[in-house]
Image: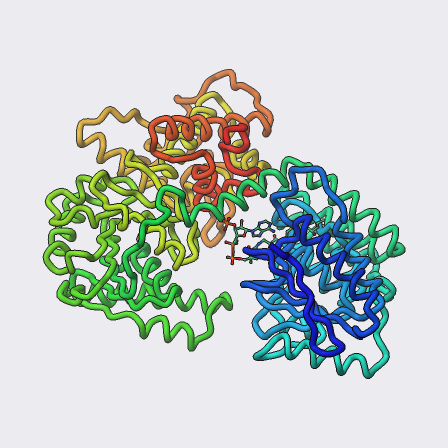
Amino acid sequence: MTVVSIGRQDDIAIVTVNNPPVNALGQALRQGLWDAVETLDADPSVRAVVLICAGRTFIAGADVTEFGKPPVPPHLPDLVNRIEAAAKPWVAAIHGSALGGGFEVAMGCRFRVALEGASVGLPEVGLGIVPGASGTVRTPRLAGVEAAVELVTTGRPFKADRAQGLGLVDAVVAGDLEAGAVAFARKALGQPLPPPISARPVTSPAAGWWDDQRKAIARRAKGEVAPLRALDCLRVAAEKTFAEAMAHERATFLDLRASDQAAALRHIFFAERAAPRPAHLSGVEARPLRRAAVIGGGTMGAGIVAALRDAGLPVTLIERDADAVARGLANLRSILDGAVKRGKLTEAQAEARLAGVTAGSDYAALADADLVIEAVFEELSVKRAVFAQLGKACRPDAVLATNTSYLDPRLIAEGLPGPERFIGLHFFSPANVMKLLEIVPTPATAPDVLATGFALARQLGKIPVQAGICEGFIGNRILKRYRAEAEALVRQGTPIAAIDAAMRAHGFAMGPFEAQDLGGLDIAFLQREGARAAGQDVPETLGDILVRAGRKGQKTGGGWYDYAPGDRSPKPSAATASLLAGQIAASPAELTAEEIATRLTGAMAAEGQLILTEGIALKPSDIDLVEVHGYGYPRWRGGPMFAQGLR
Ligand code: 3H9
């Protein structure tokens, strides 16, 4: 396949890159571009060059699959310099995304023209590295230090119009990108050329500004090293010569590329991309999804409605009676209002989301639904009653899903006519925000129904993970083990606050006890009580002792910790200490923060190993995705299985 081809529009050469799927800068493409510069420099009939890409996007970056291998020339920084030093001006014509090395190549060009809606960015920190082909050095020279710091240290791309406002691109065109870029090039040839970016000046802010940035980034990064190293590169770029800054950036890039954090982030990057299309479902066609319905308008049901509406699906919401319908709609409204407040939706978008929902209590409204998701109270008899009605009201080919998080889906589906259309779809709260979706087939689930679960995840922009049937599936089963291990540490005398602090230091947003106080201790307690009532042998937990004493977490003013009214910051609790006193070892084992984290993440991985052995999860990376996307496991550690070398 020819990855680079050269065409002409009179005296303007058109260099087209065609390296599907995302025009990543593998060795062949780097060489092809290098050769194109040489060829066009030598051609006196060419006055300017437009660099454009075939397919869905402009060059989306270096080829990440090459990162584990020794670099082969031409190296990307040299290629960017070569394009910049070309005898004719190059114009990058950007559609889709110009990311990482792709945007660095665009900065080697004398001009950048973007199609409306395109974006540019330097997402390298998300892969645990810094830009390695002048991104930290040319960006501040192109658009100033402040824009460069935001672009590089957050890794978030900028849309074309914002990029133009900051000077990252020179023009935004609508319609035919190639024609627009050629017209731009012709006009540019009639004027003096701007200096190449490497020759442009850069002004460094005062030392205090850099210190403030460092503090803010360190707070956000929670142990992730790349954003801070990227800031260092930008500071060197602003304070030293171009050549010195390039050398510093390259050394940092190579150092980080070989780091554990980069390996972990690459692992998650590829696991996320593999998840929506599992190999065992290739060739299995999903059922069409045009209309969806949700049964139950509680927090979870309303969140699922919001997620379905975000994906543009019309939704029918069914509740028991008129009051419950009104409450369900109010729940949805409050989710949408929250999104407006946070700037995620405009008022008009929120209204449109709401307008696409038909709510009522009559199951007859489900006659044309392609997919129904049950999200009612977590009790078997209640759920069974719902499916008995669905069995009568829905089309025989409609996919019927339960959002249960603990119950056995086989029991929920018992007696359902057409059990092959039944599946578990376990969303995480808030369902319109959390990316994880556990997909739980029963032995009766048809392959195309399973494929429909994955298709739904793709449509909703979620990360799907297939889970087998066991209590808690993958995520909640590991959570239970994690909490049990944390309680075991408390029993051995490790202070509650030391455990939470250790897990935060490890990169979790919260420790296990703070998280329980936030979510409420009563949910898991009621579950254990249910199991006990059903005759199972469930030993008393420390959490049970607290709940029995009325300490259910923040909502009761205290759980593992105390909380002052209106203050969510946890304070060590004398009441908790006295309630648990009889359970705690007299001579405590002194553990370091690292030992605590190793013990707890080790327990997660051990449970993950059991889950794999039992066939509940299909592969270790699925478990890592569950933990990273559902339970706050630090992404840059790659998940519990990756961290233990279980890949
Ligand atoms: C970098 O550039 C370093 C430089 O500064 C310095 C170097 C010296 N490489 O996401 P999708 C594959 S670091 C290899 O589903 P979309 C992906 O695995 C890089 N493969 O598509 C998948 O494969 P498959 C900085 C890549 O349309 C397929 O392409 N750049 C790469 O939803 C489709 O991917 C980035 O971090 C890659 N760089 O989204 C950009 N990227 O089909 C990362 C993708 O076999 N990429 N693949 O499963 C993206 O953000 C998205 O892919 C993009 C398209 C937005 C471009």
Residue 18 image position (x, y, % from top left): 60, 60
Residue at the farthest top position? 587
Left or right: where 424 falls relative to 488: left
**What x and y, as percent, mark residue 196?**
83, 67
Please tell me whether residue 246 is drawn above or below residue 585 in the rendered image. below
Instruction: Tell me if residue 195 comes above or below residue 157 in the rendering.
Output: below
Question: Would residue 212 appear left or right of 386 to someone viewing this image?
Answer: right
Q: Residue at x 80, y 80 (%)?
A: 189
Which one is in front, 168 or 24?
A: 24
- Residue 579 seen from this side: no
Q: Residue at x 78, y 46 (%)?
A: 250
Whether residue 401 is visible here, answered yes or no, is: yes
In the rendered image, residue 93, in percent from the top left (x then y), is placed at: 66, 70
Depth order, front residue of 632/423? 423
Q: Is residue 593 left or right of residue 491?
A: right
Q: Is residue 542 above or below residue 140?
A: above
Q: Quadrant of residue 142?
A: bottom right
